Amino acid sequence: MASSAPVGVFDSGLGGISVLRALRAALPGEDFLYFGDSRHAPYGDKPLSQVRALSLDAAGVLLDRGAKAIVIACNTATSAAAALLREQHPALPIIGTEPALKPAVERHRGGRILVMATEMTLHEEKFRHLQAQFQGQAQVEAVPCPGLMEFVEQGIFQGAAVEDYLRAHLGPYLCAPVDAVVLGCTHYPFLLDAIRAVVGAGPEILDGAAGIARQTRRRLEAQGLLNPRTAGGAVTFLNSLDDPAILARCEALLAR
Ligand code: DGL
């Protein structure tokens, strides 16, 4: 595989663009192919077998176009299909996404940490394992947010509807002090202002995008796949919805 080939990135929709922004900052010489499966979004409330199949198809779209590595810019797809993808493509760098619980615990030992994510992410083995790893080091509480990613898919980032949703879902957890809120879905960083308005100024809000970008850089370097260019990388957006408006929304999110 040539180092000049693009890095493939996929998500159930547009949320993974929050990861793409960090990838672009860390790897400015790389070309990126971003596939958003908006036709099938959300993944988080679908059966596991279906999310596995959709994730394999999404990776297939990128590999057919010559991707040299795959970044799964989706916590849900990572929980469901990362192991399977690695089994099927043992030589391919495959970088997954998981809620940034480790840095949250390191920064707030003994504190109270909320993890917002899809139901699938929170119920799958990957997160349960992660949670068990930090047992006793912090009070970690899982906050399922079904339906929250849809606001981002529709281009709604703030306003009464999002804040009402957040108050209804986060409100019960805010009766006691919170030290950190982990955004365990790649759509949620686009809702940062609305989340901040609801949780208040106190808690630190973390997401995993910068960590994924660093890990991608390490993996490309280790396999001799880093593009020698240091600037000028391009982004190509693909989406399972055949709608030019979606592609325009992708460009706008990347520029946000
Ligand atoms: N961006 C996905 C994630 O990180 C969205 C989940 C969904 O499609 O439900 O989990």
Image (tube, helix red, strand yellow):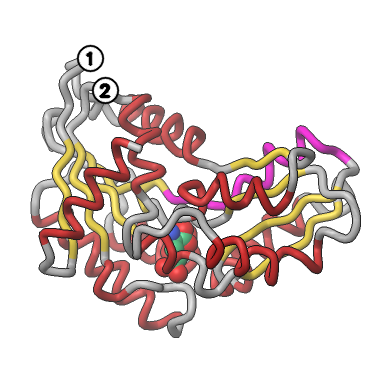
Assess whether residue 194 is covered by the magenta stretch.
no
Residue 78 visible to an observer of this rendering:
no
Callout 1, which amino acid?
A: Thr
Q: Where in the figure is residue 186, as x and y percent of width and height? A: 46, 52
What residue did someone put label 2 on? 28
The residue depicted at 73 percent of the width and 58 percent of the height is 131
* Position of 124 relative to 213 (above/below): below
The picture quadrant where one finds residue 26 is: top left
Distance from the alpha carbon under mark 2 to that under mark 1 = 6 Å
What residue did someone put label 1 on? 230
**Residue sitting nearer the eye, 104 or 162:** 162
Circle 2 crowding by C-alpha within 10 Å: few under 14, some 14–19, many from 20: some
Q: Where in the figure is residue 148, as x and y percent of width and height? A: 51, 67
Q: Quadrant of ligand 1?
A: bottom left
* Position of 144 relative to 179 (above/below): below
The picture quadrant where one finds residue 118 is: bottom right
Mark 2 lies on a secondary structure that is: loop
The residue depicted at 51 percent of the width and 35 percent of the height is 211
Q: Which residues are magenta?
A: 96-109
Callout 2, which amino acid?
A: Pro
Q: Where in the figure is residue 98, as x and y percent of width and height? A: 54, 52
Q: Cβ–Cβ below 8 Å for labels 2 and 1?
A: yes
**Residue sitting nearer the eye, 4 or 211:** 211
The N terminus, quarter of image: top left
Looking at the rendered structure, the number of numbered marks drawn on it comes to 2
Q: Where in the figure is residue 188, as x and y percent of width and height? A: 51, 53
Circle 1 crowding by C-alpha within 10 Å: few under 14, some 14–19, many from 20: few
Residue 206 visible to an observer of this rendering:
yes
The residue depicted at 26 percent of the width and 59 percent of the height is 36
- Relative to 30, 187 lies left or right: right
